[in-house]
Amino acid sequence: MASILFACIPDQGHLHPLTAVAAQLAKHRSCSVAVASLEQARSGVEKAGLAFISLGSFSDEEASEHARLTRAVFDAGASFTEKLFAVTTAQVEMAGGKMAAGLFQHLEQARSAGSMPDVLVTDNLTVAGYEAAEQFQLPLAVLAQYPLSQSLLMAGLNSYNYPSDVPLESMPLNFSAHTANPLLRYVVSPALKSLTALASDWVFKAARNRLRAQLGMPRMVRGGVFALQEGVPRSLFICGASWELNAKRPLPDNWQLVGPMGVDYSAPGSFPPQLGDKDAQAQQFLQDAQAAGENVIYVATGTMVVLTQHQINAMAEAFQTLAADPNTDTSTTTSSSSSKPVRVIWSLKEATQQMLPEELRSSQPAEQGGSSSRVLVLPWFNQAAVLAHPAVKLFVSHGGLGSTNEGLSAGKPIVCMPFSGDQPTIAQQLVDRGVGVRVDPVRLTAARMVAAVQQVLQDERCSHTAAAMGERLRSSSGAGTAAQLLLQFAAAGSS
């Protein structure tokens, strides 16, 4: 029986797709599966029915600082350098250092007991997995939860991004795949692709080398933020991106694109997912909208993004304008008189709701009427089930890969408001593929948000393209395909 050990940072956007793959793999009797992470991840791993191995825990002070740095990564007003510093400190030095110490200790004990894993599987931002595979000479599989271009760049394989028909898709700059400007395509884009790699390597490699020094390991030789160094006997890279959004190009032999790993509707009858007893408010709201023949837009900006008061004000005004009662005179609003009224479901953390105008706070009963009965604000929704509901016609999102995959798998176009990381790249991909529009969160106004929403709602081609893409994405299982690839990878080592 093959033994496969997964390692992942406790961040939900990375942990969720990794546990989905591990859960698929655990269904096979030919292997044993466990997930190693910090204590903060225990509940999510065990909820998925998986064995959990604790690699230690952040103290309250460390957890607070890690959360602060993670939020800084998604601060729309922070510079590119500030964001790089924040993610480097949070994920390489803090999470990486804490996890590496625990993972090394666990593997030392496993080696002494003669129970070493046959394969180590790591999330691509979990630096401890890279160092452990090298130190203990374990076959390593990497689950990459980024757009293809950024995954290749971080792995030290940026040369695969150089073809002229591959757009510039690197932090913080993105060029449209449809640009016809030869100067941009053949001169500026290749130069910026190289410069971006140099800049990210300069910041990340210094932090990674400091971690390696603490672990008694030599400095990195191969380039790339998370490039595998000598000592890893075999490797496999499984990317959670899909060709639906990413430009096709040749890939290394050990790279595979499998599509979304965190959302899976491939089993018969699994789509649409249903709202449950805990979703009574959302269910009634959606039923009322559907009965009235009105469209619903769903709004969520993830767990990490921290919205400013200005952004909250602009979004609140926009959604109140869009959701104006059809029987009320809206001539003084920014909405077009010919626009069909909509209803809005807004997922907003409870603490952030205090920044809303009083009539939109979830504590206000909908029976009071006005726009509050047409805008439902709650701290949590069953996002997959809400997006899959036929009344929902549009998703306003920050553009994280997990949320984007959920929206597109449900066949819904997206108004993307990207803050940091891979989000600007994903926003550009949505625009290029005709399944969304982009709104700049730094320059956000109510009028711009209203215009973006109305543009998508009135664009039938955009809706049809998104619906067709959703059908294709639902036809396969990214997590299931990844699990099969891991089984083959493990078997290749025993043959």
Image: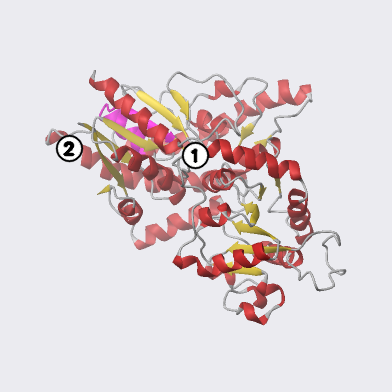
Residue 418, magenta (yes or no): no
Residue labelled with disc 1:
260
Q: Residues within 10 Å of mark 1 (few under 14, many from 20)?
A: many
Amino acid type, label 1: Pro
Amino acid type, label 2: Ala
Residue at position x 52%, y 66% in the image: 379
In the rendered image, the quadrant that contains the N terminus is: top left
Of residue 163 and residue 62, the one placed in the foreground of this image is 163
Residue at position x 86%, y 62% in the image: 337
Residue 142, magenta (yes or no): yes
- Identify the element where label 2 is drawn: helix
Q: Residue furthest left?
A: 113
Picture coordinates of residue 373, whole percent (x, y): 66, 74
Residue labelled with disc 2:
110
Q: Nearer the viewer, mark 1 or mark 2?
A: 1
Instruction: Please tell me whether residue 143 is drawn above or below residue 9 in the rendered image.
Output: above
Q: Residue furthest bottom?
A: 368
Picture coordinates of residue 62, whole percent (x, y): 38, 57
Give the magenta part as a residue range: 128-143
